[in-house]
Image: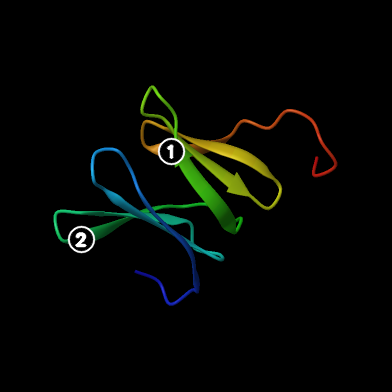
Amino acid sequence: MSKNDVYTIYKDNSGNLWVSTLGDGIYKYENKEFKNYPLSKPTMNMLEDKDGRLWFGCSGGLYRLDSRDIINVTTTGPWN
């Protein structure tokens, strides 16, 4: 894991731990290892919807884990 500050820790419905940092993306703890999902925005909140999709509230918008990548799903707002 990076040396960036941890902002949020979240446990999803499958028991996986997710850790957000202030500048090095989001990490998933799995099989005794941390896997990084790059995201340059600090992530302030995480949640899982009823369909098992992970959503991330970040400075600058709303993001979602889409298979292996984190995508910005925000279409309008003052951050564009």
Q: Residue at x 55, y 64 (%)?
A: 23
- The residue at the far right in this view is 78
Mark 2 vs mark 1: in front: 2
Residue 14 on image: x %, y % = 24, 39
Tell me how many marks there are. Answer: 2
Secondary element at image label 1: strand
- The residue at the far left in this view is 31
Location of residue 76 by image quarter: top right
Q: Which mark is residue 69?
A: 1
- For mark 2, what is the residue? 33
Q: Residues within 10 Å of mark 1 (few under 14, many from 20)?
A: few
Q: Are marks 2 and 1 in contact (CB under 8 Å)?
A: no
Residue 50 on image: x %, y % = 40, 24
The kind of residue tagged 1 is Asp
| Placement of 44 over or under 76, stated as above or below | below
| Quadrant where the image shows the N terminus | bottom left
Residue 58 on image: x %, y % = 62, 50
Quick check: 13 left or right of 71? Answer: left
